Protein backbone atom coordinates (compact mmCIF):
# COMPACT_ATOMS: atom_id res chain seq x y z
CA UNK A 1 0.00 0.00 0.00
CA UNK A 2 1.10 3.57 -0.63
CA UNK A 3 2.74 5.34 2.23
CA UNK A 4 2.70 9.07 2.80
CA UNK A 5 6.49 9.42 3.06
CA UNK A 6 7.20 8.14 -0.43
CA UNK A 7 6.64 9.85 -3.76
CA UNK A 8 4.55 8.14 -6.44
CA UNK A 9 4.36 9.57 -9.93
CA UNK A 10 1.02 9.62 -11.78
CA UNK A 11 0.59 11.42 -15.08
CA UNK A 12 -2.63 13.23 -16.11
CA UNK A 13 -3.84 12.98 -19.69
CA UNK A 14 -7.02 14.00 -21.53
CA UNK A 15 -8.09 12.12 -24.63
CA UNK A 16 -10.66 13.79 -26.87
CA UNK A 17 -12.12 11.34 -29.38
CA UNK A 18 -14.67 12.36 -32.06
CA UNK A 19 -17.27 9.89 -33.32
CA UNK A 20 -19.94 9.87 -36.04
CA UNK A 21 -22.69 7.29 -35.67
CA UNK A 22 -24.87 6.05 -38.53
CA UNK A 23 -28.55 6.06 -37.59
CA UNK A 24 -29.38 3.31 -40.08
CA UNK A 25 -32.69 2.59 -41.79
CA UNK A 26 -35.14 2.41 -38.91
CA UNK A 27 -33.71 5.21 -36.76
CA UNK A 28 -33.37 7.50 -39.80
CA UNK A 29 -37.09 7.11 -40.56
CA UNK A 30 -37.95 7.74 -36.92
CA UNK A 31 -35.76 10.84 -36.67
CA UNK A 32 -36.84 12.34 -40.02
CA UNK A 33 -40.52 11.94 -39.05
CA UNK A 34 -39.74 13.66 -35.75
CA UNK A 35 -37.83 16.47 -37.45
CA UNK A 36 -40.05 17.11 -40.46
CA UNK A 37 -43.54 16.24 -39.20
CA UNK A 38 -43.24 16.29 -35.42
CA UNK A 39 -44.42 12.69 -35.28
CA UNK A 40 -43.27 9.78 -33.11
CA UNK A 41 -43.08 6.54 -35.05
CA UNK A 42 -42.54 3.12 -33.49
CA UNK A 43 -42.72 -0.39 -34.94
CA UNK A 44 -45.09 -3.19 -34.00
CA UNK A 45 -43.91 -6.80 -33.95
CA UNK A 46 -46.09 -8.96 -36.23
CA UNK A 47 -45.95 -11.79 -33.70
CA UNK A 48 -46.06 -10.45 -30.13
CA UNK A 49 -47.57 -7.06 -31.11
CA UNK A 50 -45.22 -5.18 -28.81
CA UNK A 51 -44.90 -1.57 -29.98
CA UNK A 52 -41.20 -0.82 -29.87
CA UNK A 53 -39.57 2.60 -29.55
CA UNK A 54 -37.05 3.46 -30.83
CA UNK A 55 -38.04 1.36 -33.85
CA UNK A 56 -35.68 -1.53 -34.59
CA UNK A 57 -35.39 -3.95 -37.43
CA UNK A 58 -35.96 -7.19 -35.49
CA UNK A 59 -38.11 -7.97 -32.46
CA UNK A 60 -35.59 -9.14 -29.87
CA UNK A 61 -38.09 -11.50 -28.31
CA UNK A 62 -39.61 -13.10 -31.43
CA UNK A 63 -36.63 -12.84 -33.83
CA UNK A 64 -38.93 -11.67 -36.63
CA UNK A 65 -38.63 -8.58 -38.81
CA UNK A 66 -40.60 -5.55 -37.65
CA UNK A 67 -42.35 -4.01 -40.65
CA UNK A 68 -45.45 -2.28 -39.34
CA UNK A 69 -44.95 1.38 -38.46
CA UNK A 70 -47.20 2.83 -35.77
CA UNK A 71 -47.62 6.52 -34.97
CA UNK A 72 -47.70 7.14 -31.24
CA UNK A 73 -49.52 9.93 -29.41
CA UNK A 74 -47.43 12.50 -27.55
CA UNK A 75 -49.10 11.68 -24.23
CA UNK A 76 -48.14 8.99 -21.80
CA UNK A 77 -47.46 7.95 -18.21
CA UNK A 78 -44.35 8.52 -16.11
CA UNK A 79 -43.14 5.06 -15.08
CA UNK A 80 -40.23 6.19 -12.90
CA UNK A 81 -38.13 9.27 -12.29
CA UNK A 82 -35.33 10.73 -10.26
CA UNK A 83 -34.46 14.16 -8.97
CA UNK A 84 -30.78 14.46 -9.85
CA UNK A 85 -28.58 16.50 -7.51
CA UNK A 86 -25.30 15.86 -9.32
CA UNK A 87 -24.12 18.07 -12.22
CA UNK A 88 -24.11 15.25 -14.75
CA UNK A 89 -22.24 16.05 -17.92
CA UNK A 90 -24.36 15.75 -21.05
CA UNK A 91 -22.12 13.54 -23.22
CA UNK A 92 -23.73 14.91 -26.39
CA UNK A 93 -22.78 18.53 -25.59
CA UNK A 94 -19.99 18.23 -23.04
CA UNK A 95 -21.88 20.64 -20.77
CA UNK A 96 -23.34 19.77 -17.38
CA UNK A 97 -27.08 19.62 -16.74
CA UNK A 98 -27.62 22.13 -13.92
CA UNK A 99 -28.82 20.29 -10.79
CA UNK A 100 -31.26 19.71 -9.35
CA UNK A 101 -33.25 18.48 -12.32
CA UNK A 102 -35.84 15.78 -12.91
CA UNK A 103 -35.72 13.04 -15.48
CA UNK A 104 -37.59 9.83 -15.94
CA UNK A 105 -39.12 7.22 -18.23
CA UNK A 106 -42.39 7.98 -20.00
CA UNK A 107 -44.45 5.25 -21.62
CA UNK A 108 -46.33 6.86 -24.49
CA UNK A 109 -49.87 5.53 -24.76
CA UNK A 110 -49.89 2.40 -26.88
CA UNK A 111 -46.14 1.78 -26.63
CA UNK A 112 -44.49 -1.12 -24.88
CA UNK A 113 -41.16 0.70 -24.60
CA UNK A 114 -40.39 3.79 -22.59
CA UNK A 115 -38.60 7.00 -23.49
CA UNK A 116 -36.11 8.42 -20.98
CA UNK A 117 -36.06 12.20 -20.98
CA UNK A 118 -35.96 15.39 -18.94
CA UNK A 119 -39.16 16.19 -17.05
CA UNK A 120 -39.97 19.88 -16.98
CA UNK A 121 -41.19 20.13 -13.42
CA UNK A 122 -39.95 21.62 -10.16
CA UNK A 123 -37.57 19.26 -8.35
CA UNK A 124 -40.13 18.75 -5.62
CA UNK A 125 -41.47 15.37 -4.51
CA UNK A 126 -45.00 16.78 -4.43
CA UNK A 127 -44.79 17.85 -8.07
CA UNK A 128 -43.66 14.58 -9.64
CA UNK A 129 -44.71 10.99 -9.09
CA UNK A 130 -44.80 7.56 -10.66
CA UNK A 131 -48.02 7.35 -12.66
CA UNK A 132 -48.09 11.06 -13.52
CA UNK A 133 -49.66 11.79 -16.92
CA UNK A 134 -47.44 13.77 -19.19
CA UNK A 135 -46.78 14.83 -22.77
CA UNK A 136 -43.84 15.50 -25.03
CA UNK A 137 -42.83 19.05 -25.86
CA UNK A 138 -41.00 19.37 -29.18
CA UNK A 139 -38.77 22.14 -30.43
CA UNK A 140 -40.35 24.42 -33.01
CA UNK A 141 -40.00 22.93 -36.49
CA UNK A 142 -37.32 25.38 -37.63
CA UNK A 143 -35.09 24.38 -34.70
CA UNK A 144 -35.38 20.62 -35.18
CA UNK A 145 -32.28 18.82 -36.41
CA UNK A 146 -33.26 15.16 -36.60
CA UNK A 147 -31.98 14.12 -33.17
CA UNK A 148 -33.63 13.04 -29.94
CA UNK A 149 -33.03 16.58 -28.67
CA UNK A 150 -35.87 17.63 -31.01
CA UNK A 151 -37.95 16.52 -28.05
CA UNK A 152 -37.16 19.28 -25.55
CA UNK A 153 -38.65 17.58 -22.53
CA UNK A 154 -41.60 15.79 -20.99
CA UNK A 155 -44.10 17.97 -19.11
CA UNK A 156 -46.97 17.06 -16.81
CA UNK A 157 -50.47 17.32 -18.24
CA UNK A 158 -52.18 20.25 -16.50
CA UNK A 159 -54.75 19.83 -13.75
CA UNK A 160 -53.22 16.89 -11.91
CA UNK A 161 -52.40 16.48 -8.25
CA UNK A 162 -50.14 13.89 -6.70
CA UNK A 163 -52.41 11.13 -5.40
CA UNK A 164 -52.10 10.13 -1.75
CA UNK A 165 -50.63 6.66 -1.94
CA UNK A 166 -48.73 4.22 0.20
CA UNK A 167 -45.46 5.71 -1.00
CA UNK A 168 -43.95 8.63 0.88
CA UNK B 1 -21.06 -30.34 -17.57
CA UNK B 2 -18.85 -32.53 -19.70
CA UNK B 3 -16.12 -32.60 -17.03
CA UNK B 4 -16.36 -31.45 -13.44
CA UNK B 5 -14.57 -28.18 -12.67
CA UNK B 6 -13.21 -27.03 -9.32
CA UNK B 7 -11.83 -23.82 -7.91
CA UNK B 8 -8.50 -24.87 -6.44
CA UNK B 9 -7.13 -21.49 -5.48
CA UNK B 10 -7.64 -17.78 -5.47
CA UNK B 11 -6.50 -14.47 -4.13
CA UNK B 12 -7.27 -10.79 -4.08
CA UNK B 13 -5.59 -7.47 -3.44
CA UNK B 14 -6.55 -5.08 -0.70
CA UNK B 15 -9.09 -2.79 -2.35
CA UNK B 16 -8.78 0.97 -2.04
CA UNK B 17 -9.64 4.30 -3.65
CA UNK B 18 -5.95 5.04 -4.28
CA UNK B 19 -3.26 2.66 -5.49
CA UNK B 20 -0.68 5.03 -6.89
CA UNK B 21 1.97 2.67 -5.54
CA UNK B 22 1.29 0.12 -8.31
CA UNK B 23 0.63 0.23 -12.03
CA UNK B 24 -1.95 -2.10 -13.57
CA UNK B 25 0.49 -4.98 -14.10
CA UNK B 26 1.86 -4.71 -10.58
CA UNK B 27 -1.62 -4.69 -9.11
CA UNK B 28 -2.72 -7.70 -11.18
CA UNK B 29 0.46 -9.52 -10.20
CA UNK B 30 -0.40 -9.14 -6.51
CA UNK B 31 -3.61 -11.10 -7.06
CA UNK B 32 -1.96 -13.66 -9.36
CA UNK B 33 0.76 -14.40 -6.82
CA UNK B 34 -1.81 -14.71 -4.04
CA UNK B 35 -3.84 -17.18 -6.12
CA UNK B 36 -0.81 -19.29 -7.07
CA UNK B 37 0.30 -19.37 -3.46
CA UNK B 38 -3.16 -20.39 -2.31
CA UNK B 39 -3.22 -23.22 -4.89
CA UNK B 40 0.41 -24.16 -4.10
CA UNK B 41 1.24 -23.86 -7.80
CA UNK B 42 3.71 -22.09 -10.01
CA UNK B 43 2.77 -20.14 -13.11
CA UNK B 44 4.53 -22.81 -15.23
CA UNK B 45 1.72 -25.23 -14.41
CA UNK B 46 -1.02 -22.97 -15.83
CA UNK B 47 -2.31 -23.94 -19.31
CA UNK B 48 -4.47 -20.94 -20.09
CA UNK B 49 -4.78 -17.38 -18.78
CA UNK B 50 -8.04 -15.46 -19.05
CA UNK B 51 -7.74 -11.77 -18.20
CA UNK B 52 -10.66 -9.39 -17.84
CA UNK B 53 -11.29 -5.72 -17.17
CA UNK B 54 -13.31 -2.89 -18.67
CA UNK B 55 -10.35 -1.40 -20.47
CA UNK B 56 -12.15 1.76 -21.55
CA UNK B 57 -12.35 2.87 -17.91
CA UNK B 58 -8.57 3.16 -17.79
CA UNK B 59 -8.22 4.10 -21.45
CA UNK B 60 -5.49 1.50 -22.03
CA UNK B 61 -6.74 -1.10 -24.45
CA UNK B 62 -5.46 -4.64 -25.09
CA UNK B 63 -4.65 -5.16 -21.43
CA UNK B 64 -4.06 -8.86 -22.12
CA UNK B 65 -1.03 -7.73 -24.12
CA UNK B 66 0.18 -4.89 -21.90
CA UNK B 67 -0.09 -6.82 -18.65
CA UNK B 68 1.37 -10.08 -19.92
CA UNK B 69 4.22 -10.00 -17.41
CA UNK B 70 1.92 -9.30 -14.47
CA UNK B 71 -0.68 -11.87 -15.49
CA UNK B 72 1.84 -14.60 -16.27
CA UNK B 73 0.38 -15.12 -19.74
CA UNK B 74 3.62 -14.74 -21.68
CA UNK B 75 3.84 -17.54 -24.24
CA UNK B 76 0.69 -19.23 -22.94
CA UNK B 77 -2.71 -19.59 -24.47
CA UNK B 78 -5.10 -16.91 -23.37
CA UNK B 79 -8.12 -14.77 -24.09
CA UNK B 80 -9.35 -11.36 -23.02
CA UNK B 81 -12.82 -10.74 -21.61
CA UNK B 82 -14.62 -7.37 -21.49
CA UNK B 83 -18.27 -7.63 -20.49
CA UNK B 84 -19.05 -4.71 -18.19
CA UNK B 85 -19.60 -5.32 -14.50
CA UNK B 86 -19.83 -9.03 -15.13
CA UNK B 87 -16.24 -9.24 -16.42
CA UNK B 88 -14.82 -11.19 -13.50
CA UNK B 89 -17.63 -13.75 -13.45
CA UNK B 90 -17.49 -14.04 -17.23
CA UNK B 91 -13.77 -14.82 -16.94
CA UNK B 92 -14.55 -17.59 -14.45
CA UNK B 93 -17.43 -18.82 -16.63
CA UNK B 94 -15.19 -18.92 -19.71
CA UNK B 95 -12.40 -20.58 -17.73
CA UNK B 96 -14.79 -23.22 -16.40
CA UNK B 97 -16.07 -23.91 -19.90
CA UNK B 98 -12.50 -24.37 -21.14
CA UNK B 99 -11.81 -26.90 -18.37
CA UNK B 100 -15.18 -28.64 -18.73
CA UNK B 101 -14.55 -29.07 -22.45
CA UNK B 102 -11.49 -31.18 -21.76
CA UNK B 103 -9.14 -28.88 -23.65
CA UNK B 104 -7.44 -27.40 -20.56
CA UNK B 105 -6.70 -28.70 -17.06
CA UNK B 106 -5.43 -25.67 -15.16
CA UNK B 107 -6.78 -22.24 -15.96
CA UNK B 108 -5.90 -18.92 -14.34
CA UNK B 109 -8.70 -16.34 -14.40
CA UNK B 110 -7.99 -12.69 -13.52
CA UNK B 111 -10.26 -9.69 -13.12
CA UNK B 112 -9.14 -6.19 -12.22
CA UNK B 113 -9.94 -2.51 -12.42
CA UNK B 114 -7.96 0.57 -11.57
CA UNK B 115 -10.82 3.04 -11.46
CA UNK B 116 -8.65 5.92 -10.22
CA UNK B 117 -6.96 6.10 -13.63
CA UNK B 118 -10.06 7.17 -15.59
CA UNK B 119 -13.43 8.84 -15.21
CA UNK B 120 -15.82 5.94 -14.81
CA UNK B 121 -18.94 8.09 -14.78
CA UNK B 122 -18.03 9.85 -18.01
CA UNK B 123 -16.95 6.66 -19.71
CA UNK B 124 -20.21 4.93 -18.74
CA UNK B 125 -21.99 7.34 -21.10
CA UNK B 126 -20.47 5.25 -23.88
CA UNK B 127 -22.59 2.34 -22.70
CA UNK B 128 -25.74 4.25 -23.69
CA UNK B 129 -27.01 4.16 -27.25
CA UNK B 130 -25.45 7.17 -29.00
CA UNK B 131 -28.70 8.26 -30.70
CA UNK B 132 -31.29 7.45 -28.08
CA UNK B 133 -30.90 8.72 -24.54
CA UNK B 134 -27.21 9.42 -24.30
CA UNK B 135 -27.72 13.03 -23.27
CA UNK B 136 -28.76 11.80 -19.83
CA UNK B 137 -26.23 9.01 -19.57
CA UNK B 138 -23.12 9.58 -17.55
CA UNK B 139 -23.47 7.67 -14.33
CA UNK B 140 -25.07 4.53 -13.02
CA UNK B 141 -26.67 6.47 -10.19
CA UNK B 142 -29.56 7.78 -12.30
CA UNK B 143 -30.46 4.30 -13.50
CA UNK B 144 -30.57 2.90 -9.98
CA UNK B 145 -32.45 5.97 -8.75
CA UNK B 146 -35.22 5.27 -11.26
CA UNK B 147 -35.25 1.66 -10.11
CA UNK B 148 -35.60 2.90 -6.53
CA UNK B 149 -38.45 5.26 -7.36
CA UNK B 150 -40.27 2.42 -9.10
CA UNK B 151 -39.70 0.15 -6.09
CA UNK B 152 -40.99 2.72 -3.60
CA UNK B 153 -44.04 3.64 -5.69
CA UNK B 154 -45.08 0.09 -6.48
CA UNK B 155 -44.21 -1.88 -3.35
CA UNK B 156 -44.50 0.74 -0.62
CA UNK B 157 -40.95 0.41 0.65
CA UNK B 158 -39.28 3.44 2.21
CA UNK B 159 -35.82 4.93 2.26
CA UNK B 160 -35.29 3.17 5.60
CA UNK B 161 -35.23 -0.15 3.75
CA UNK B 162 -32.47 0.88 1.39
CA UNK B 163 -30.62 2.29 4.40
CA UNK B 164 -30.78 -1.15 6.02
CA UNK B 165 -29.04 -2.64 2.98
CA UNK B 166 -26.42 0.13 3.13
CA UNK B 167 -25.71 -0.60 6.78
CA UNK B 168 -25.60 -4.38 6.37
CA UNK B 169 -23.05 -4.11 3.57
CA UNK B 170 -20.66 -1.77 5.36
CA UNK B 171 -20.94 -3.56 8.71
CA UNK B 172 -20.13 -6.85 6.95
CA UNK B 173 -17.24 -5.15 5.15
CA UNK B 174 -15.74 -4.24 8.53
CA UNK B 175 -15.20 -7.97 9.03
CA UNK B 176 -13.52 -8.35 5.62
CA UNK B 177 -9.90 -7.24 5.71
CA UNK B 178 -9.76 -6.78 1.93
CA UNK B 179 -12.88 -4.59 1.63
CA UNK B 180 -12.69 -0.94 0.59
CA UNK B 181 -15.47 0.80 2.59
CA UNK B 182 -15.33 -0.51 6.13
CA UNK B 183 -17.82 1.90 7.66
CA UNK B 184 -19.27 1.73 11.14
CA UNK B 185 -22.56 3.33 10.09
CA UNK B 186 -26.14 3.31 11.33
CA UNK B 187 -29.49 3.62 9.57
CA UNK B 188 -29.49 7.29 10.60
CA UNK B 189 -26.10 7.83 8.97
CA UNK B 190 -27.36 6.32 5.73
CA UNK B 191 -30.55 8.40 5.78
CA UNK B 192 -28.57 11.56 6.50
CA UNK B 193 -25.95 11.01 3.82
CA UNK B 194 -25.96 13.38 0.85
CA UNK B 195 -28.76 12.95 -1.67
CA UNK B 196 -27.29 12.14 -5.08
CA UNK B 197 -30.39 11.30 -7.10
CA UNK B 198 -33.63 10.68 -5.25
CA UNK B 199 -33.99 8.15 -3.64
CA UNK B 200 -30.27 7.29 -3.85
CA UNK B 201 -28.01 8.81 -1.23
CA UNK B 202 -24.25 8.64 -1.01
CA UNK B 203 -24.33 5.56 1.22
CA UNK B 204 -26.75 3.80 -1.17
CA UNK B 205 -24.06 3.61 -3.85
CA UNK B 206 -20.90 1.56 -4.33
CA UNK B 207 -17.47 3.22 -4.18
CA UNK B 208 -14.96 3.47 -7.03
CA UNK B 209 -12.25 1.00 -6.04
CA UNK B 210 -8.95 -0.25 -7.35
CA UNK B 211 -8.22 -3.93 -7.01
CA UNK B 212 -7.75 -7.33 -8.59
CA UNK B 213 -8.84 -10.90 -8.01
CA UNK B 214 -7.43 -14.11 -9.48
CA UNK B 215 -8.73 -17.67 -9.38
CA UNK B 216 -7.37 -21.01 -10.52
CA UNK B 217 -9.75 -23.60 -11.95
CA UNK B 218 -8.92 -27.24 -12.57
CA UNK B 219 -10.41 -30.49 -13.78
CA UNK B 220 -11.52 -33.12 -11.27
CA UNK B 221 -8.37 -35.24 -11.44
CA UNK B 222 -6.06 -32.27 -10.89
CA UNK B 223 -8.31 -30.80 -8.22
CA UNK B 224 -8.44 -34.00 -6.19
CA UNK B 225 -4.67 -34.53 -6.49
CA UNK B 226 -3.67 -30.94 -5.73
CA UNK B 227 -6.28 -29.40 -3.47
CA UNK B 228 -7.40 -30.18 0.04
CA UNK B 229 -10.48 -28.01 -0.33
CA UNK B 230 -11.63 -27.87 -3.93
CA UNK B 231 -14.87 -25.94 -4.44
CA UNK B 232 -16.98 -27.28 -7.28
CA UNK B 233 -18.61 -25.19 -9.95
CA UNK B 234 -21.94 -26.93 -10.45
CA UNK B 235 -23.78 -24.67 -12.85
CA UNK B 236 -23.37 -21.38 -14.69
CA UNK B 237 -25.92 -19.28 -16.52
CA UNK B 238 -25.88 -16.08 -18.51
CA UNK B 239 -28.69 -14.05 -20.06
CA UNK B 240 -28.98 -10.82 -22.00
CA UNK B 241 -31.80 -8.34 -21.79
CA UNK B 242 -33.59 -6.43 -24.50
CA UNK B 243 -32.46 -2.81 -24.87
CA UNK B 244 -34.61 0.33 -24.70
CA UNK B 245 -37.09 -1.36 -22.38
CA UNK B 246 -38.00 -0.54 -18.80
CA UNK B 247 -37.47 -4.05 -17.52
CA UNK B 248 -35.23 -3.97 -14.42
CA UNK B 249 -36.49 -0.49 -13.56
CA UNK B 250 -40.10 -1.71 -13.62
CA UNK B 251 -40.39 -3.77 -10.47
CA UNK B 252 -43.78 -5.08 -11.59
CA UNK B 253 -42.62 -6.35 -14.96
CA UNK B 254 -43.91 -9.79 -15.79
CA UNK B 255 -41.41 -10.33 -18.59
CA UNK B 256 -38.82 -13.05 -18.20
CA UNK B 257 -36.01 -10.51 -17.91
CA UNK B 258 -32.31 -11.41 -17.75
CA UNK B 259 -32.16 -11.97 -14.00
CA UNK B 260 -35.21 -14.23 -13.79
CA UNK B 261 -34.38 -16.10 -17.00
CA UNK B 262 -30.86 -16.97 -15.85
CA UNK B 263 -31.92 -17.92 -12.31
CA UNK B 264 -34.76 -20.08 -13.62
CA UNK B 265 -32.47 -22.01 -15.94
CA UNK B 266 -29.83 -22.46 -13.24
CA UNK B 267 -32.42 -23.77 -10.76
CA UNK B 268 -33.78 -26.21 -13.33
CA UNK B 269 -30.29 -27.54 -14.03
CA UNK B 270 -29.72 -28.25 -10.34
CA UNK B 271 -33.27 -29.21 -9.42
CA UNK B 272 -33.69 -26.30 -7.01
CA UNK B 273 -37.22 -25.80 -5.69
CA UNK B 274 -36.55 -23.29 -2.94
CA UNK B 275 -33.30 -21.35 -3.51
CA UNK B 276 -33.47 -19.78 -0.06
CA UNK B 277 -33.21 -23.25 1.46
CA UNK B 278 -31.05 -24.91 -1.20
CA UNK B 279 -28.18 -22.40 -1.00
CA UNK B 280 -26.42 -21.59 2.26
CA UNK B 281 -25.03 -18.22 1.20
CA UNK B 282 -25.41 -15.75 -1.66
CA UNK B 283 -22.91 -13.27 -3.07
CA UNK B 284 -24.80 -10.94 -5.40
CA UNK B 285 -23.82 -7.96 -7.52
CA UNK B 286 -25.46 -4.87 -5.95
CA UNK B 287 -23.96 -1.57 -7.14
CA UNK B 288 -26.84 0.17 -5.31
CA UNK B 289 -28.98 -0.75 -2.32
CA UNK B 290 -32.20 -1.00 -4.34
CA UNK B 291 -30.60 -3.54 -6.67
CA UNK B 292 -30.06 -5.88 -3.72
CA UNK B 293 -33.76 -5.82 -2.83
CA UNK B 294 -34.68 -6.56 -6.44
CA UNK B 295 -32.15 -9.40 -6.62
CA UNK B 296 -33.89 -11.03 -3.62
CA UNK B 297 -37.11 -11.06 -5.62
CA UNK B 298 -35.64 -12.01 -8.99
CA UNK B 299 -33.71 -14.90 -7.42
CA UNK B 300 -36.89 -16.15 -5.76
CA UNK B 301 -35.64 -15.69 -2.18
CA UNK B 302 -39.06 -14.15 -1.58
CA UNK B 303 -42.09 -13.19 -3.62
CA UNK B 304 -42.42 -10.06 -5.77
CA UNK B 305 -42.64 -6.95 -3.59
CA UNK B 306 -41.33 -8.77 -0.52
CA UNK B 307 -37.61 -8.01 -0.86
CA UNK B 308 -37.74 -5.13 1.58
CA UNK B 309 -39.40 -7.37 4.15
CA UNK B 310 -36.40 -9.74 4.03
CA UNK B 311 -33.98 -6.97 4.95
CA UNK B 312 -36.42 -5.57 7.51
CA UNK B 313 -36.58 -8.97 9.22
CA UNK B 314 -32.80 -9.37 9.15
CA UNK B 315 -33.08 -12.58 7.15
CA UNK B 316 -30.16 -11.74 4.87
CA UNK B 317 -27.80 -10.75 7.68
CA UNK B 318 -24.52 -12.62 8.01
CA UNK B 319 -26.06 -14.73 10.80
CA UNK B 320 -29.53 -14.87 9.26
CA UNK B 321 -31.17 -17.83 7.52
CA UNK B 322 -30.37 -16.48 4.00
CA UNK B 323 -27.02 -14.67 4.30
CA UNK B 324 -26.44 -12.30 1.39
CA UNK B 325 -23.06 -10.64 0.79
CA UNK B 326 -21.25 -11.39 4.05
CA UNK B 327 -18.18 -9.93 2.32
CA UNK B 328 -19.74 -6.47 2.18
CA UNK B 329 -20.48 -6.88 -1.51
CA UNK B 330 -20.15 -4.40 -4.32
CA UNK B 331 -21.59 -1.67 -2.09
CA UNK B 332 -18.36 -1.87 -0.11
CA UNK B 333 -15.86 -2.71 -2.87
CA UNK B 334 -16.30 -2.02 -6.56
CA UNK B 335 -13.18 -2.58 -8.61
CA UNK B 336 -15.44 -3.25 -11.59
CA UNK B 337 -13.50 -5.86 -13.57
CA UNK B 338 -12.80 -7.76 -10.34
CA UNK B 339 -16.16 -7.22 -8.60
CA UNK B 340 -18.02 -10.12 -10.20
CA UNK B 341 -15.08 -12.49 -9.67
CA UNK B 342 -14.97 -11.41 -6.03
CA UNK B 343 -18.56 -12.67 -5.70
CA UNK B 344 -17.46 -16.14 -6.87
CA UNK B 345 -14.22 -16.12 -4.87
CA UNK B 346 -15.94 -14.92 -1.69
CA UNK B 347 -18.56 -17.66 -2.12
CA UNK B 348 -15.76 -20.22 -2.55
CA UNK B 349 -14.08 -18.94 0.63
CA UNK B 350 -17.38 -19.41 2.50
CA UNK B 351 -17.61 -23.02 1.31
CA UNK B 352 -13.97 -23.67 2.26
CA UNK B 353 -14.60 -22.10 5.66
CA UNK B 354 -11.77 -19.68 4.96
CA UNK B 355 -13.64 -16.37 4.97
CA UNK B 356 -12.21 -15.46 8.36
CA UNK B 357 -14.14 -12.89 10.37
CA UNK B 358 -16.94 -12.69 7.83
CA UNK B 359 -17.42 -16.47 7.69
CA UNK B 360 -21.13 -17.26 7.85
CA UNK B 361 -21.76 -19.02 11.20
CA UNK B 362 -23.26 -22.20 9.77
CA UNK B 363 -22.28 -25.17 7.63
CA UNK B 364 -21.87 -23.79 4.10
CA UNK B 365 -22.16 -26.48 1.46
CA UNK B 366 -23.74 -24.57 -1.43
CA UNK B 367 -23.44 -21.00 -2.61
CA UNK B 368 -24.83 -18.92 -5.42
CA UNK B 369 -23.41 -15.80 -7.01
CA UNK B 370 -24.69 -13.24 -9.48
CA UNK B 371 -22.99 -10.67 -11.64
CA UNK B 372 -24.50 -7.62 -13.23
CA UNK B 373 -23.20 -5.37 -15.93
CA UNK B 374 -23.43 -3.81 -19.32
CA UNK B 375 -26.94 -2.70 -20.03
CA UNK B 376 -28.53 -5.53 -18.09
CA UNK B 377 -27.02 -8.91 -18.42
CA UNK B 378 -25.86 -11.40 -15.87
CA UNK B 379 -23.59 -14.33 -15.16
CA UNK B 380 -24.68 -16.64 -12.35
CA UNK B 381 -22.62 -19.37 -10.74
CA UNK B 382 -23.58 -22.17 -8.34
CA UNK B 383 -20.86 -23.70 -6.16
CA UNK B 384 -20.76 -26.69 -3.83
CA UNK B 385 -18.47 -28.26 -1.25
CA UNK B 386 -18.60 -31.75 -2.72
CA UNK B 387 -19.86 -33.28 -5.93
CA UNK B 388 -22.62 -34.91 -3.88
CA UNK B 389 -23.98 -31.61 -2.55
Image (tube, coloured by chain):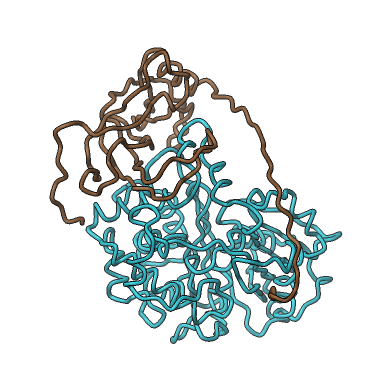
Chain colours: A brown, B cyan
Residue, far right = B75
**Hey, which quadrant is residue B282 in on the image?**
bottom left
**Hey, which quadrant is residue A20 in on the image?**
top right
Is any part of residue B221 visible from this angle? Answer: no
| Residue beneath the point at 36% across and 64% down | B296
Left or right, residue A78 beside residue B203 = left
Nearer-the-camera pick, B283 or B160: B160
The count of marks equals 0
Residue, far front = A5
Residue B77 at x, y percent in the picture: 80, 57
Residue B178 at x, y percent in the picture: 59, 76
| Residue beneath the point at 26% across and 28% down | A75
Left or right, residue A168 beside residue B340 = left
Residue A62 at x, y percent in the picture: 43, 35
Is any part of residue B327 visible from this angle? Answer: yes
Quick check: B225 above or below B255?
below
Nearer-the-camera pick, B296 or A122: A122
Image quarter where the N terminus of chain B lies is bottom right
Residue B203 at x, y percent in the picture: 41, 65
| Residue beneath the point at 79% across and 55% down | B66
**Hey, which quadrant is residue B299 in on the image?**
bottom left
| Residue beneath the point at 44% across and 86% down | B362
Nearer-the-camera pick, B293 or B57: B57
Amino acid sequence: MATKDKEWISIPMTVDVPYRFAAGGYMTKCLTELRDNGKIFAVECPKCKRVQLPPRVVCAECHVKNEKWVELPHEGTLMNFTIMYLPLTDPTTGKPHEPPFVYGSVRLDGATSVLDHMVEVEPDMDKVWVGMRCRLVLRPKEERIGDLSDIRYIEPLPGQKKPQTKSR
Amino acid sequence: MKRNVAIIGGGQTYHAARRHDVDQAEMVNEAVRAALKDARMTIDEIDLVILGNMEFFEGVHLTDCWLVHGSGAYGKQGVKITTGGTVGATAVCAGAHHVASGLFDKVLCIGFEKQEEGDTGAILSGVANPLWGRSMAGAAVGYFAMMGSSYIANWGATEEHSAMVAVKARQNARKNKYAHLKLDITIEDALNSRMLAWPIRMLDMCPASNGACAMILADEKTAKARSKKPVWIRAMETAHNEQFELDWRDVKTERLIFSKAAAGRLYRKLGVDDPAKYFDVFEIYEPATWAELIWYEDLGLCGPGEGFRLIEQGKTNIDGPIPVNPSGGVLSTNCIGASAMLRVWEAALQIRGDAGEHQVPKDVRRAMTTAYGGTNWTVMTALSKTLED
